[in-house]
Every structure is written in structure tokens, then in C-alpha cells.
């Protein structure tokens, strides 16, 4: 596994994307809505990974609840794997708890969220890019 991205919950994804791109000297952001997670994301690509800014699309979004409780800030760290099913099974055998099952994420990835109680209060996402399915992890973007 390797770190794939850091996700940050924001109130206004357009404004946050402009701020991050300018501050980091990035070429801009790519936007996508992930209906299953109730978010609109801005993806900012860096040499060694990505920053994913997430804005809720409605009041029932987990990000909406996060913003109400904690305000804007770090939401989760994502770890890339080429075998999400195998990693989830291995981790569950060791006692790691997950929130829901494996599901679709941004850019066609498959994702699973590790419960924060399993990782000292940190929400982690396992993600498997489409190119990695059935083989080695895709190279960094």
C-alpha cells in the first residue's frame, strides 16, 4: 500500500480548490460528483499524490454531518492497494473494523473505509484504482 490522497472536508469546493491550487502551485483542479457518497470533489494532483477537497451535495451526506460536528478540515487519509478485497479480508481477520462495504469512489475507484476506532481515531480509506483491479497498484499520478 501507498498513500494515495488526503481528503479535506470543505464548505465551498470551488473556492477551496482555487485556494489550494494557488497555494500549492498546482495547475488547477478536476471536479467530480460522487452520488453514492453525497459529495462533490475537487482533485488537485501533486507530484506524489493528490489532495481531494470534498463538499457535501445535501444534508444527508456524511460530509455534511462531519462539517456540522467538526468544521472544515482533514477528513481521511487514503491508502492505495491493487487488491482491495484481499486487503479488507486480511484486515478484518486481524480485527480491523470497516464502515460499510466496498463501494464506488471518485475517478472510478473502489473504496472501503476503515473505522476510526481501528486506527487510533483516524478515518482511513482503502482505494483501488480501476487500472489496479486484478493486478499491481497503478503508478502514482
Image (spheres, rainbow, N blue to C red):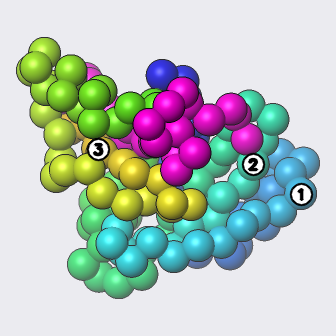
Give the labeled residue for mark 3.
113
**Left or right side of 100 for 112:** right
The crowd level at tag 2 (other Cα within 10 Å; few <14, some 14-19, many 20+) is many
Give the labeled residue for mark 1.
27
**Left or right side of 64 for 41:** right
Residue 126 occupies quadrant: top left
Q: Which is more toward the observer, 134 or 95? A: 134
Q: Which range is magenta?
A: 116-141
Residue 16 in view in this figure:
no
Question: In the rendered view, would you say 4 is above or below 21?
Answer: above
Residue found at x 70% / y 34%: 140
Return the disc, 2 or 1, that comes first in the chain's sequence.
1
Check disc 3 and report its element: helix, strand or loop.
Answer: strand
Question: In the rendered view, would you say 119 is above or below 27?
Answer: above
Distance of label 2 from label 3 (alpha carbons):
22 Å
Give the labeled residue for mark 2.
45
Q: Position of residue 81 (x, y in %)?
A: 45, 31
Distance of label 3 from label 1 (alpha carbons):
29 Å
Return the disc, 3 or 1, that comes first in the chain's sequence.
1
**Left or right side of 78 for 112:** left
Amino acid at each position: 500500500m501507498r498513500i494515495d490522497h488526503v481528503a479535506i472536508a470543505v464548505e465551498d469546493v470551488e473556492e477551496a480548490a482555487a485556494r489550494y491550487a494557488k497555494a500549492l502551485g498546482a495547475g488547477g483542479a478536476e471536479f467530480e460528483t460522487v452520488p453514492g457518497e453525497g459529495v462533490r470533489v475537487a482533485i488537485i494532483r501533486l507530484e506524489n499524490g493528490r489532495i481531494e477537497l470534498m463538499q457535501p451535495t445535501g444534508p444527508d451526506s456524511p460530509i455534511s454531518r462531519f462539517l456540522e460536528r467538526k468544521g472544515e478540515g482533514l477528513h481521511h487519509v487514503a491508502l492505495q492497494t491493487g487488491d482491495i478485497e484481499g486487503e479488507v479480508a486480511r484486515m478484518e481477520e486481524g480485527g480491523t473494523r470497516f464502515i460499510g462495504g466496498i463501494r464506488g469512489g471518485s475517478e472510478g475507484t473502489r473504496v472501503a473505509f476503515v473505522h476510526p476506532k481501528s486506527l487510533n481515531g483516524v478515518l482511513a480509506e482503502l482505494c483501488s484504482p480501476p487500472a489496479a483491479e486484478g493486478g499491481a497498484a497503478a503508478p502514482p499520478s
